[in-house]
Amino acid sequence: MTNSRIRLAMLVAAVAFAGAFTYACQTSSGPAAGAGDAASEVYVAPGEHDEFYAFMSGGFSGNVTVHGLPSGRLIKTIAVFSQYPENGWGYSEETKDMLRTSFGLIPWDDSHHPQLSQTDGIPDGRWLFINGNNTPRVARVDLSKFETEEIIEIPNSGGNHASPFITPNSEYVIASTRFSVPIPQADVPIATFKENFSGTLTFIRADQPGEMDIAFQIHVPGFDYDIAHSGRQVSDGWAFFTTYNTEQEHTLLEVNASQADKDFVAAVNWRRAETCVAEGAGSVVPGQYVHNVMGEDRIGRSELKNSVRMIEPADCSDMIYFLPTPKSPHGVDVDPTGEYIVAGGKLATTIPVHSFSKMIDAIANEQFETVIDGIPVLEYEAVLAGEVQEPGLGPLHTEFDADGNAYTSMFISSEVVKWRLGTWEVLDRQEAYYSTGHLMIPGGDSSQPFGKYVVALNKITKDRYLPTGPELAHSAQLIDISGDNMRLLLDFPTMGEPHYAQGLPAELVTANQVQMFDLTENTNPYATLTEADARIERDGSTVHVYMTTIRSHFAPDNIEGIMVGDTVLFHVTNLEQDWDVPHGFAVIGARNSELLVMPGETRTLRWVPQRVGVFPFYCTDFCSALHQEMQGYIRVSERGSNPTIAYGTGG
Amino acid sequence: MTNLKASPASRRIVLAAALALVALYFVPLWKISLEAPQYPEGIGLLIQIDNIEGVGPHDLKNINGLNHYIGMKEIVPEAIPELSYMPWILAVLIGWGLLAAATGKRWLLYSWFGVLVVTAVAGLVDFYLWGYDYGHNLDAEMAIIKIPGMTYQPPLIGTKNLLNFTATSLPALGGWIGILAGLLVGWRTWKEARGARRARATAG
């Protein structure tokens, strides 16, 4: 305990020192040197497009934001795990099942790590995956529509953090339990953590859209499984997970889980696991999870599943090894060649780099320190490629360029440090404002870094923007890495806490854009394909309003015959077949949201009128010069008055 | 005795021109393009021998949607009679040309050229009249945007500003093929006529 107190005291001193240093630098240097040049380098003239897409995790907003680089401009919020009243995501009848879980509809999550789909280890621009940390889930966003199309829940997990970290041909996205829990869940004393708590590493089949499925789970010791990355090139077929709390403590972890000098990187040979599964290893265990898919008819549907295949390390030899790694490692990053596995020991004073080839040799030579629950622990020196000395304080995450350089974020000393793979020498430092977490180089966690910029995703903004009360903007910083020395170009705010990001050249995404949905292919059973078909049908106390929109009117726009307490389902079909002409639908007293209906699409809003009267509805998305006229009325009569249904537009 | 046959070269060129007209069944004759700030990528109509369709898959629908603001009639290809009989007129023209090439009779060549010119002029006049009708006979009741004195007739050929749109009307590939075929036939008609005149002069 005394030792740890001293270490903590040193850490606090280091933080204070780093803060003072940062402040001094800022006041002495004023605005970034060469700010004029930087301005022109991030300037994207009106009407021109950015060179890269950047997909930022929306953090506790549960969503993903899309920015252009180098401008940093926010161009889209993609609703993923959180209900999004702006377009009705998770509220409309067609989308609410997408947020379904084994706990019911969960309207929120904490999204952490976006991952682009890859082909041959290179981002291919088809899909973006992102994890939900709180209620363990992984979502797939289709990048032709910038829309969430699939969400799968992860059973036997508590906090899906080391996720989704895709394999080089998108075979799997992975998941882990950050918080070990009783598996299967059980009513046990928390103090029995060491006996009763354990973890899982999950491999989710991901290369067939609409068919994501939990291929298998690996049952692992009760540590915290933090971050991961899949191997690539020489290490293709492996995945690497950091662990902390190998002390297996269950309270005051900030102290108790910081005791061991080394925790582990878990190296998982997933090809080997596949073979074992194919040979029938492991067993089918209970585990409820829900799989939600947006169908071809653009209706989300949920399927509840009840079991998964679980493998014990003892069931499958040579499948998993532990690599000792100093001080509660956080990020684990694999260089473009796949040889180097960089771990960010967040309390360490060095950056340890493991060698994949040395690891393979050490396994062959059985250089094991010990074995934990059937998992061999390799000797640290036997797998170590090298250590970056004095990199800074609090190394967290590393990204790579195509020239053999690595860039590591330093949380405590608030800087990005560039160093050389192989020689481990520090080449350059760039201050970050402040407390940078993840970094992102377009393609910087793939076999083909596209380079040019590193984006620092900062945890604290403090004085970087106009103050906005107690809660301040979260921030990213764009840093040029095209020369020998890094140059800070731009600050730009982000949504939620941006945990991680992905980037790629814009043309990989722009080539496949969907501009609208073909009305003739609209198979929603409540679609209304022509204005002549607009109608109202009563079915008991449910009233279906088959409504169309086209610039700039609703059909019908006068509705009578509704009673208080009816369930009114507005099935709104947008008849437009023109790019960028959505129509909105909003009705007074709607306790869910509005609808935003894309051209050719049908979306349904449930509305239960509570009062007698005549109530307006209108289009919320400015659609034409006569948008303001795009409105209508719905008359609500007393319950039991059985008014005649009447409706129409014009005439 | 005067030779009533066209030269082999003329017959070959006439044959080529007649066959070239077959392409008019497959490629558009005319194109009307519209540009506006809201449509930087452009929007437009293609006039085919038997149809009017959008340049993009939904352009016709969207042009009709835009036209409703000014009270213009909806463009419904099925309701335009010319589109149902123009393919037959073209068939007659091609047949006439093939016959002229096959027989080599000069009078068939001359008459073919005459018919081609008349058809082209009639077609342009008809096109103008349709444009005039759509552009002037606006539904005053349904028109949302009414500008006194403003009409919306698209140009017959060339470019014209219509409110926020710049409309450009030009022959499309089929139109150019027709024009080229007409010029070739005209050229051979002129050569044959000159040859025949000289022959008569020599004979006389």
Image (cartoon, grey):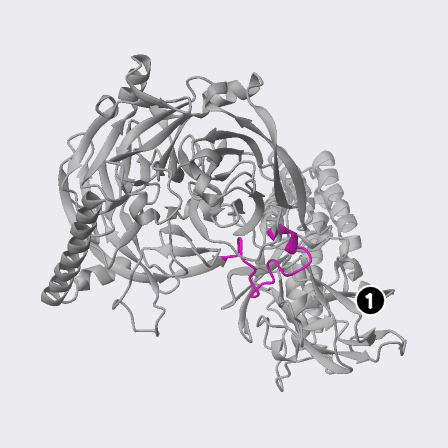
In the picture, which quadrant includes the C terminus of chain A?
bottom right
Whether residue A369 is in magenta: the answer is no
Q: Which residues are magenta?
A: A78-99
At mark 1, the secondary structure is strand
Residue B93 image point, x, y percent: 73, 47
Whether residue A81 appears in magenta in the rendering, the answer is yes
Tell me what residue is drawn at x 42 percent, y 49 percent.
A112
Q: Left or right of A293: which side holds B119?
A: right
Neighbor class of circle 1 (other Cα within 10 Å; few <14, some 14-19, many 20+) is some
- x, y percent for residue B51: 72, 54
Image position of A440 (left or right of A566): left
User: Closest to the observer: B109 or A300?
Assistant: A300
The structure residue drawn at horizontal position 32% and vertical position 13%, both measured from the top left corner, is A364
Residue found at the very far top of the displayed protein: A365
**Which one is nearer the viewer's eye here, A310 or A250?**
A250
Where, by quadrant of the figure, is residue A556 drawn?
bottom right
Chain assignment, label 1: A
Residue, disc 1: A535
Residue A228 in picture, x, y percent from top left: 38, 37
| Observer able to see residue A163 | no
> Which part of the image, by quadrant, shows the N terminus of chain A?
top left
State the residue lying farthest toward the bottom: B148
Q: Is residue B91 above or below residue B68?
A: above
> Closest to the observer: B197 or A147?
A147
Instruction: Determine the image quadrant of residue A263.
Output: top left
Query: Is B107 located above or below residue A377 in the figure?
Result: below
Q: Which residue: 66% across, 60% down?
A: A92
Q: Amino acid at mark 1?
A: Arg
